[in-house]
Amino acid sequence: MNDAEMYARYNQEANKALMRILDGLSNDEREMDRGSYFGSLSELARHGMSGTCFLLGILKEALAENAAAAEALAGLPAWPEKGPLDEAGWKKLGRDLAAADAAYVGMARALGDGDLRLPIKIDWNGGNPRRKRRPESAAPESVPLSFMLGQLTVHGAHHRGQISQILDEMKIEHDFSGMGIALKSPAGATPCRSMKASARSRLSLG
C-alpha cells in the first residue's frame, strides 16, 4: 500500500464510520439547521462528498495516460444536488459517497512517483484575479498532484470535524478517525515515496 492509497483508505474508512452514525439518526435530525456554515448534518456530508468529486475531477486530465487511474476516476458519481433530502435522497447520497471514495482509493492505488509530480492547474474559477492585482502574493498557476491529494485529506478531515462537534453537542458517541487503516499497511510496501516529501520538493508558493 503506497502513501496515497493509505490516506485514501483512511478517508474511506472514516466516511464509512461517519455514515453509520448518521444513518442511525432520523431524517429530521440530519436535516435540522445546526448553525454551521453548511447548516445541517446532511448538508455537511454532501459538501464533503462534493469536495472529493471536485478535487478528484480536476486530476483526470493529468492522469489521462495512467490507464488504471483513469479507469478508477471514471467511476466518480455526479455532484449531489443541493436542497433538503428525504430518506431516499439520503440513502442515494450514501451510495454516491461510497462510489466516490472507491474511485479515490482505486486512483491512489494506481499512482507512481512520476504521477505525484504532475502539475495540476488550480485557476479553476475563470482565472486567478489576485494574480493581476497582487502577483507577488497570488497562488501559483499549478501545484504538484501530491499537494492536491493532501488537500483531499485535509478537506475531508475538516468537515468530519465539524460533524464531530455537532455530534458532541447532541451527546452522541462517535469515533470515525479512520486511524486504524495505517496498521493495515504492510511494512515496506510503498511503491510511491512519501507524498509529503514529494510536495516539499516540488511545491513553491513563492
Image (cartoon, rainbow, N blue to C red):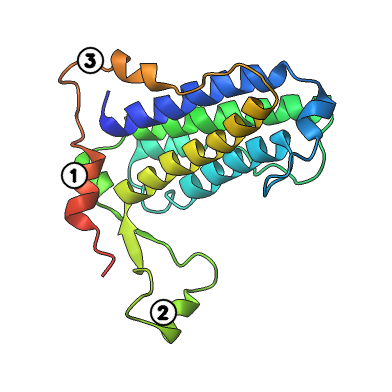
Q: Is there a contact, CB below 8 Å, between mark 2 and mark 1?
A: no
The residue mark sitting in front, 3 or 1, is: 1
* Residue 156 image point, x, y percent: 50, 38
Q: Nearer the viewer, residue 79 or 148?
A: 148
Q: Is there a contact, CB below 8 Å, between mark 3 and mark 2?
A: no
Q: Quadrant of the C terminus?
A: bottom left
Instruction: Indicate which disc residue 180 carries.
Output: none
Query: Considering only order in the chain, which callout, 1 or 3, is on the residue closer to the N terminus?
Result: 3
Mark 3 lies on a secondary structure that is loop
Disc 2 residue type (three-letter): Arg
Alpha carbons under labels 3 and 2: distance apart: 44 Å
Q: Quadrant of the N terminus?
A: top left
Q: Residue at x 32, y 80 (%)?
A: 136
Alpha carbons under labels 2 and 1: distance apart: 27 Å
Instruction: Indicate which disc residue 197 carries.
Output: 1
Q: Is residue 142 above or below residue 66?
A: below
Query: Considering only order in the chain, which callout, 2 or 3, is on the residue closer to the N terminus?
Result: 2
Q: Which residue is mark 3?
A: 186
Q: Residue at x 37, y 18 (%)?
A: 181
Q: Nearer the viewer, residue 94 or 17?
A: 17
Mark 2 lies on a secondary structure that is helix
Q: Which residue is mark 2?
A: 131
